[in-house]
Each structure stands twice: as structure tokens, then as C-alpha cells.
Amino acid sequence: MPSRRCCALVVLFAGIALSALAQDGAESARPHLGTPLGEAEIARSSITIFPDGRNLPAGRGSARGGAVLYRERCAACHGDSGREGPAARLVGSDGLFSFGDPLRILRVRDHPLLVLSVGGLWPYPTTLFDYIRRAMPHNAPKSLSANETYAVTAYILHLNGLLGMDAVVDAATLPRITMPGLTRTRDECPPDRPCTGDPCVQ
Ligand code: HEC
């Protein structure tokens, strides 16, 4: 028995020593992937625009100018009027479903029959600018200049009846447009009940 206990101890110490070695080895054998980002690269990704308009870039664009851009860069996927698709519907709040994803209707909690579109549900015009600038056109994201993004944002707001064709938007005027979606959506973190942590896991 004593000799078995001795063996067990040797195995235990050998195990501890080996695991310490393995940790040292792991440190030096780390793949060292990635490189530190430069200021310019960080600036390219740090482009969040807040509902109140914070971070909107300089520049301006008219709905009329946006109409031309929309025909060239957006209509193929979103349809001439922003309703036809085949990609996500951008205009109107009538009808039953979004062309982009008919099943999304099943995921809307409070307004199951409300069509999902910018004009139907989006609460802030500034989010529209943010989304277009970072994600559209789908086949060439981040390819639009600030002026082009203002223009096409204005045109989509025009298609939704929220702006005239001669309207021009910039960092001062865009946040002042009130979207129909503001009263149709719920703020998960209202000022009187601010969220702590991630609202998605509360
Ligand atoms: C190659 C096809 C394509 C082109 C071109 C394109 N889009 Fe899109 N767009 C999509 C798809 C697909 C989605 C849905 C993306 C998703 O839900 O992840 C989308 C979603 C959107 C949305 C969000 C709609 C919502 O309610 O979810 C907006 C706004 C939008 N596009 C605007 C534009 C604008 C403005 C342009 C032109 C500058 C443009 N898109 C060009 C394919 C395209």
C-alpha cells in the first residue's frame, strides 16, 4: 500500500509540473494573430450615430439628388418605389408583410399586422442614415459619401411622405424629423427606467 501511495504522489506532482510547462508553452506558442488598428481604421468603424444626431458627419443632401442615386444604387434590390423588393421594404406601413422576409411578421410582438419598413417602424431618421452609411448598398457597403448618404436618406423619407422633394437634410435638420415609428415602437431603456447591463438579456 505505501508504495502505491508513493506512486500516486509522483504522478500527481508530475501532472502539476506538466500542466505548468504546458501553460508556459501555450503563452509562447500563441498564434499572435491580428495587428493593432491605426487611427484611420478605427475612425472608419467608429461611426455610430445616436438618435439625437450625435456623430452625424458634416455634409448635406437633397431628396431630389437622392432620387437619382436611389435609381442607380438601390432600386434594383428595393424596387422603384421602395415597396416592391425583392429586398427589405423601405416605404409605407400598409400591407401585411415585408418582402425581404415574409416570416418577420411572426416576430413582431406588439403590432403583428404592421408592415415592417422604414416608414412603418423605424423610430429615428438618424438610424436610417447610420444604417445606410454602414450597410448599403448591400453589394458595396460604406461606398457612399456623407453627402450621398444624406441625399438618399432624404429621398427615402420623401418616399414615406415625411419630406418634400426639395428638402435638404444635414446634421442639424435630420434629427428634427419625427418618424411614425416613434410611437409604434418601445424604448427598452426609457429615461425613467434606464437599463443596467444588456437590455436583451434582462
Ligand atoms: C444588392 C441588393 C441591395 C442593394 C443594391 C441595396 N440594398 Fe438595401 N437591403 C438589401 C438587403 C438584402 C437588406 C436586408 C438586410 C438585412 O436585413 O440584413 C437591405 C436592407 C436595407 C434597409 C433596412 C430595411 C429594414 O427595414 O430592415 C435599408 C434602409 C436599405 N436597405 C437601404 C438601401 C439603400 C438606401 C440602398 C442604395 C444606396 C440600398 N439599400 C441598396 C439589399 C440591397
Image: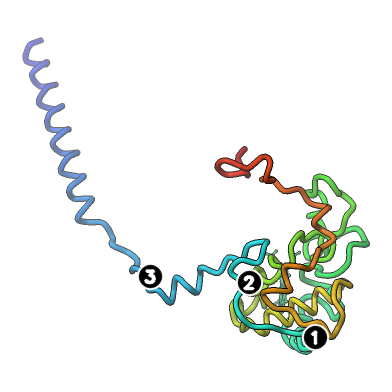
Question: x and y percent of residue 64 in the render?
Answer: 81, 87
Q: Secondary structure at mark 1?
A: helix
Q: Which mark is residue 37?
A: 3
Q: Label 2 belongs to which residue?
A: 135
Which image quarter: residue 78?
A: bottom right
Name the kind of residue labelled 1 in the image: Ala
Name the kind of residue labelled 2 in the image: Ala
Q: Secondary structure at mark 3?
A: loop
First reached walking from the N terminus: tag 1 or tag 3: 3
Neighbour class for label 2 at 10 Å: few (<14), some, many (≥20)?
some
In this view, 31 is above or below 130: above
First reached walking from the N terminus: tag 1 or tag 2: 1
Question: x and y percent of residue 200 in the render?
Answer: 63, 44
Name the kind of residue labelled 3 in the image: Leu
Question: x and y percent of residue 133 in the render?
Answer: 63, 74
Which image quarter: residue 1?
A: top left
Q: Label 1 belongs to which residue?
A: 67
Query: Which residue occupies 67% across, 75% down?
Result: 171
Whole-number angstrom distance, CA of label 1 to CA of label 3: 37 Å
Q: Nearer the viewer, mark 3 or mark 2?
A: 3
